[in-house]
Amino acid sequence: MLNTSSATRTAALLAALSVSAGATPALAQDAAANGAQPPATADDSAAAVGADAPAAATAEAAADGSASPADAGAATAAAPLDTIPVKVPPPRQAPAAAVDVQGPAQIAEIIVTATKRTQSIRDIPASITAFTGEDLENTGKLNLNDFVQESPGVTAAQGSPGFTRLTFRGISTDTNPYSGNAQPVGIFIGDVPFTDPYVANIIPDLSAFDLSDVEVLKGPQGTLFGGAALSGAIRYQLQEPQLDTWQARGFSQYAKPKDGSSAFTEGLSVNAPLFRDDLAVRLAYVRREYPGTMDNLRTGEKDVDASSGNQYRGQLLWQPGNWKFKYTHLQQDFQGDDQLLFTDSPRGPRASDVAITPQPSQNEFHLDSLESAYDFDGVRAVSLSSWVKRDANYTKDYTSVLIGTPPPGYPAEAGVFTHVVDNSKSFSQELRLQSDDGGPFTWLVGAYYFDYRMYFNILIDTQLNQDLLGQDSVLGSNPAVAALFALLGAPSAAATTSLLDGTSNAKSTEKALFADLSYEIADALTLSAGGRFYRTEVTGGFVGSGLLIAGNENDGPQSNSVATLKESGFNPKLSATWRFADNASIYATAAKGFRFGGLQDLPSTPTNGVPPTYKSDTLWNYEIGLRTDWLHKTLQADLTAFYIDYKNPIITQSTQGIPIAYNTNVSAAISRGFESSLLWNTPLRGLTWSLSGAVTDAHITKSFTASDGQVVEPGQEMPGAAKYQFNSSLQYLHAWKFLTLAPIASYTYVGKGYSDITHQVEINGYGSFNAGLLIGADGLWGSPKLALNVNNILDVTRPVAGGTGTTLVTRQPTETYLLNQPRTITARFSFEF
């Protein structure tokens, strides 16, 4: 099923608005191509379609003055009237359809690079949603979690920024944002992977400011993207430098959640040509504040989870002749003094009294990439080299795991905490050759190498023990004490007397060859085939000590389990597209995906049931999609059916006592369902309605016994899956004097699901009403815009993740919940020169 971006609707509305306001057809064409005025969201499968070639050619001719007198007559007649000024279309926006001045605007074409070549989103036999950066800005979206669930079949749970758990089409094994299980969904900035083959680290959560778009690709992307995209992928696309245009953009946004703290976010970007018309630079900076919504009932502090971060972006583009060189640098950081995020009740209040120590969190990532390309006659050669470094450091209070809610006056020194350090760095190199897009036969072949290094440490201890024997304490830093523990064959005093002090040092590699071929038979049928041969290797393990180790090991106070896991395979992909009518086509796709296997980041002992390794999980995705256009391409209606066969799922389990997550392969699963969408530019010029939805049945097919002894029977729903999900929006674009007014109203529903495979906590099952108003004045100096938005108007509160358990000492039941965002008001002012 094809999913359209919000640019589709905005482009069409602008085209209609330009004509109704008295603009020439050429201006209407420019407005539609810009596609960035009213706020909008992306509907699942409602991709945009351009105009018929004659109509598009007429509009282009009118724009450049080459139209015949008959063609240009309307433009000449309309010239004296007032028009709405429009900007030069940004990169990657597709030309829109020519506009029939007597009827609603046609839906414009959207261009994406999801297949590593420039294509219309409607020509790709896959499910893709594209959210334009400008539309995300206009609707006040700040985080990935704010909009990704508007693509049906996608659910998400976010902890601190950088920790988000994604589920595509019900394929997930955990919804905890802090799970160590690697994501089944690949995250990319351009074609640079943020893959975690071993232990999950932070993922990018870029501000929408100065983004080109965000593409959501459902279904395995293993042929082109390897082990990073088992069930799908999210690709951030940055705005490239423009070689011949000076540009400055800026914004300031205010956000205020209900009963939470206020937050401001500001950003500035500059585009500067440097030499002739072949060298330019684009720089951007965003300072983000995240509002707090959680209260600490024990200390009386409110909104303790308020936090902040920075984003830095820089791109240098040089295009001499047939060459292209692009260097990209990205940096993002986050700091929070107390990330108290989990509540005690599934319906609120957003407060907790179980934490007795602060829970600070910091993380950052750095990305550097160099893309080099050369265009031969009919062939392009591309090299992409990238370096990614990520560091995460956070603390969680575990006191309640031992005794439940601590009594009043419980000393902080007796509290139990877990501290995690997760550092990784990776290098990837891709080389590929690909044909031009002009002929009936297109091809792409390439080679890929990925090298990943990780350091992971988890410490579980009491503050009292750290004060007495920690590295900075008097005893812990005493050489005599260190010598005594060494004589006993034990690590440091603090490590030996802690509950757990474990370290994983790991190295992972992927080597692959891939190809993607497509042949158009006549004008009606296109056949495509691709595949990826891959070989992966993971080397590492766990070295740990502490009371939990000593209690389980028979060979001393320290565990040392190091191993190597090697795997190889082939990921094929086949598709066919049949355009059986001018306004309709059908496609069928079969594709295989995989995710890295790995080694545990905690000890495997004779008594804890933790296997030392877990192998790759794989799936086959089969789908068939129907795409139709109606009413002179002003209405699109699409339908997709899919079936996924999931083998060896990597399931997250927890050790008994103090719960420490580990991974294991158990059972098998299937996911099947339907996705549909409708997009309509109504006869009332400027009014667009969209509706999209999904029905998903994702469940296991083989019984297994969970780590807590519970037998999970066939038919048990997969974690994170929402059986029903839909999104609808209604927006209207109106010109009033020199202003553009664009109100929008939308509703998103995410059906009930469960937090994990044993169904500990019921999650989601709620709908959210949202509304906004964009006021733009492109004719004024600086093209100012004011966007006012309210999300979750009714302030519906539901958990999106959570867990249950039994305290280790007092044997009391416990429950924790991560809630959705409350009602939030945003106001955003932006300008552009």
Image: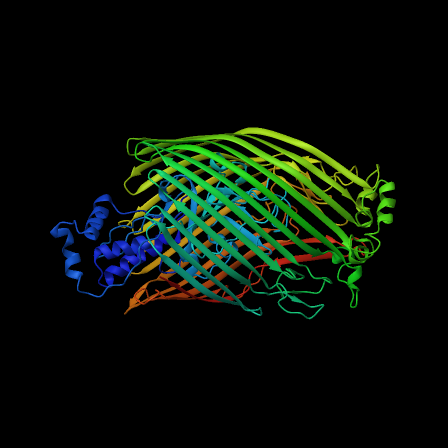
Left or right: where 273 falls relative to 357: left
Q: Residue at 51% of width from left, 61% of height from top?
A: 287
> Residue 729, position in %: x, y?
41, 58
Q: Quadrant of residue 54?
A: top left
> Residue 805, position in %: x, y?
72, 53
Q: Identify which residue, 762 or 789, lies in the foreground.
A: 789
Q: Quadrant of residue 508?
A: top right
Q: Locate the C terminus by quadrant.
A: bottom left
Left or right: where 201 falls relative to 492: left
Q: Is residue 56 visible?
A: yes
Relative vertical location of residue 83 with respect to residue 647 in this rendering, above or below: below
Q: Residue at 79% of width from left, 55% of height from top?
A: 466
Relative vertical location of residue 384 with respect to residue 422 in this rendering, above or below: above
Q: Identify which residue, 575 or 142, lies in the foreground.
A: 142
> Residue 207, position in %: x, y?
49, 56
Q: Is residue 43 visible?
A: no
Q: Locate the N terminus by quadrant.
A: top left
Q: Residue at 17% of width from left, 57% of height from top?
A: 75
> Residue 379, position in %: x, y?
35, 32
